[in-house]
Amino acid sequence: MDIPIFQVDAFHHELFKGNPAAVCPLKKWLPDEIMQSIAMENNLSETAFVVEVDTGYEIRWFTPLSEVDLCGHATLATAHVLFNHLDFEGDSIAFFSASGNLFVRQGKEGLIYLDFPAQKPLLVKNEEIYEEAMGLKPKSALKGKKLMLVYENEEDVINLRPDFQQLIKLNDIGVIATAPGNDFDFVSRFFAPAVGIDEDPVTGSAHTHLIPYWSEMLNKKFLRAWQCSGRGGILLCENHDDRVLIGGKAITYMNGYIHI
């Protein structure tokens, strides 16, 4: 059996930047253990599998260690593949996922916008273990599906050197570090060692938490964000109360076939 595979750098317009994701278009779902093995073999932060249905596409995402219920950059990568390689007609795609219905539209100049449910994190106690795990005490801590730690400035976030074993104890879905940006409205980094990703280069799902928070803090509906990982990624963000728009570009690195 031959399975098409594409590798796409998401949330950037240049190769070798942004977040690489694998995309596997399927005619029907494979057994879960096969999809998990493919994701482990790819050894990327996410592999997306997609199956066409009557009104859109069902989509699932796997890290090298487990399936997750939402991934932004791999959704953007999948939309990029559909728009640019699989002759999708139209400017908008509906994806059906474990996190509900997700919508993607193609904008101007290669931009792709993800329309995702917002996650509004709530303040929690600023525990001592946060400082132990991150190497620097955050200003405040909030929690939604993910734990979000807020720091004073961009340099604090860039210079973080987390203890990944300690991080695993904090939140099994992942930990966001964020601060106001110098040239962007806000910056962030994302760590998820519990699911096999010490640091994710650019994380769309983290911005479902970040956008509502910074929109309120900065009193802005439209925000520009930079995920300041080693590869880096640029995100154009809009807050729409219970939904958020996350815009970015993508570029294809390679395509081929998996032989099973």
Image (tube, rainbow, N blue to C red):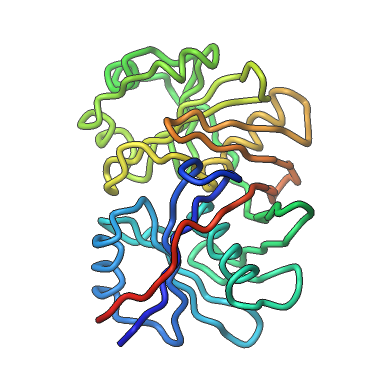
Q: Quadrant of residue 159?
A: top left
Residue positioned 58% across, 72% down in the render: 85
Residue positioned 30% across, 24% down in the render: 162
* Quadrant, the C terminus: bottom left
**Number of on-image labels:** 0
Residue 153 visible? The answer is: yes
Residue 86 on image: x %, y %: 59, 77
Farthest left residue? 165
113 sits to left or right of 130 = right
Q: Is 32 drawn above or below residue 108 in the view shown?
A: below
Q: Is 202 drawn above or below residue 138 in the view shown?
A: below
Q: Quadrant of residue 191?
A: top left
148 sits to left or right of 101 = left
Residue 206 on image: x %, y %: 51, 41
Residue positioned 52% across, 75% down in the render: 58
Residue 219 on image: x %, y %: 77, 26
181 sits to left or right of 145 = right
Q: Is 91 drawn above or below residue 158 in the view shown?
A: below
Foreground of the two, 77 or 180:
77
Residue 176 on image: x %, y %: 45, 33
Residue positioned 71% across, 29% down in the render: 216
Residue 70 visible? The answer is: no
Q: Is 60 drawn above or below residue 141 in the view shown?
A: below
* Quadrant, the N terminus: bottom left
